[in-house]
Image (tube, rainbow, N blue to C red):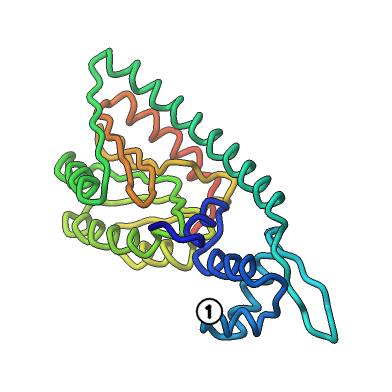
Amino acid sequence: MVTNNELFSEFGLTGNEGKILEALVNLGPSTGTAIASKLGINKSVAYFVLDQLVQKGFASFVVINKKREYRSLDPIMLNMKLEERKKDFLKKYGDISSILSQVSQKKKKGVIANLFTGWDAVRTGFNELLSGGIPSDEWYVFSINIPESIAPRFRRFMRHFHEQRVAKKLVCNLLIDQRYKDTIGKDRKSEPYTNVRFVSEEHSMPVTINVYSNKTLMAVWAEEPLIIIIESKEVAESFKSFFRLLWNGAKKA
C-alpha cells in the first residue's frame, strides 16, 4: 500500500519532508518538538525539515510564547501545488514525447531502437552498451538528475556498472547536476578513466542521456526505470555535438 508520505513525493518532497508534512497534516498546528516526539526523530532534524517545508511553501509558522508553531498548507493550497506539479510533469512528458517521436521517424530509415523497463531489464540494457564499441571510444553522459527516492539504489547500480566500465578502461565524460556534487559527483570523481563537470539545475534534463560508440541510451529514472537504446551513428553524433557544447560551458569538478 502506498503511504501518504510517498504520495507527498509527487510534490517533489524528500522522504523526510513527506513524513513530517504528513505528521503536520494529521496533528494540526504543532511545534518541532511535538513532531519529533510523534515520529521518534531528533528534534533538530524535525526543526530543520520544517524550515525546509516553510521555504518550499508547504508550511508556515507563528511564534507563540517564543516558540514556533508550524501549520501545514490548507488542503486547497496543497491541491494547487499538485496541479503545478502535474503541469511541470506534462511539460517534461511533452519533451520526452518529442524526442521519442524523432526516434520513431529515424527508425523508419533503418535506425534500431530497443526499450527496457524495470531494474533487471535496465541492467541488461546497460550491459548491452558495454558490450559494444572499442576502448578508443569515449563515453558521454548528461545531465544526471535523479529522484531522491531512488538515489541510494541508483548509486549502487551505477557503482557496479562503472566498475565494469573501468575494468574495460573505457573513458567516461559526465555532466552532472551540481546538486549532486557531493554524492553522485563524488562517486564518479573517485574512479579512473572518468572526467566530471557540473551544470546548473536549469540545464538538467527530464531524461539522462548516455552515448557510446554508435549507441544512445535514454534513461527515465523512477521506481521502475525505463530506458531506450537507439543504435544509429547519426543520432549518436548529434548527441555528442550537443554534449560538447554543454561541456565547454560547464564547471570543472
Q: Quadrant of residue 8?
A: bottom right
Left or right relative to 239: residue 22: right
Count the marks: 1
Q: Is residue 216 above or below residue 234?
A: below
Q: Is residue 143 above or below residue 101?
A: below
Taking depth in this image into account, of 178 and 146 the one nearest to the observer is: 146
**Residue 181 location (% of width, % of height):** 49, 63
Residue at 43% in and 41% down: 207
Taking depth in this image into account, of 107 and 116 the one nearest to the observer is: 116
The residue most toward the left is 131
Taking depth in this image into account, of 210 and 22 the one nearest to the observer is: 22
Name the quarter where the N terminus is drawn: bottom left
Q: Residues within 10 Å of mark 1 (few under 14, many from 20)?
A: few
Q: Amino acid at mark 1?
A: Leu
User: Could you say whether the residue bearing mark 1 is in a helix, strand or loop?
Assistant: helix
Residue at 50% in and 41% down: 246
**Residue 31 location (% of width, % of height):** 70, 80
Q: Is residue 73 above or below residue 236?
A: below
Residue at 66% in and 65% down: 53
The residue most toward the top is 109
Left or right relative to 137: residue 46: right
Is residue 35 visible to the viewer in this orientation of the structure?
yes
Residue linked to disc 1: 39
Left or right relative to 190: residue 244: right
**Residue 248 location (% of width, % of height):** 51, 44
**Residue 44 location (% of width, % of height):** 62, 84
Is residue 135 visible to the viewer in this orientation of the structure?
no
Residue at 36% in and 62% down: 188
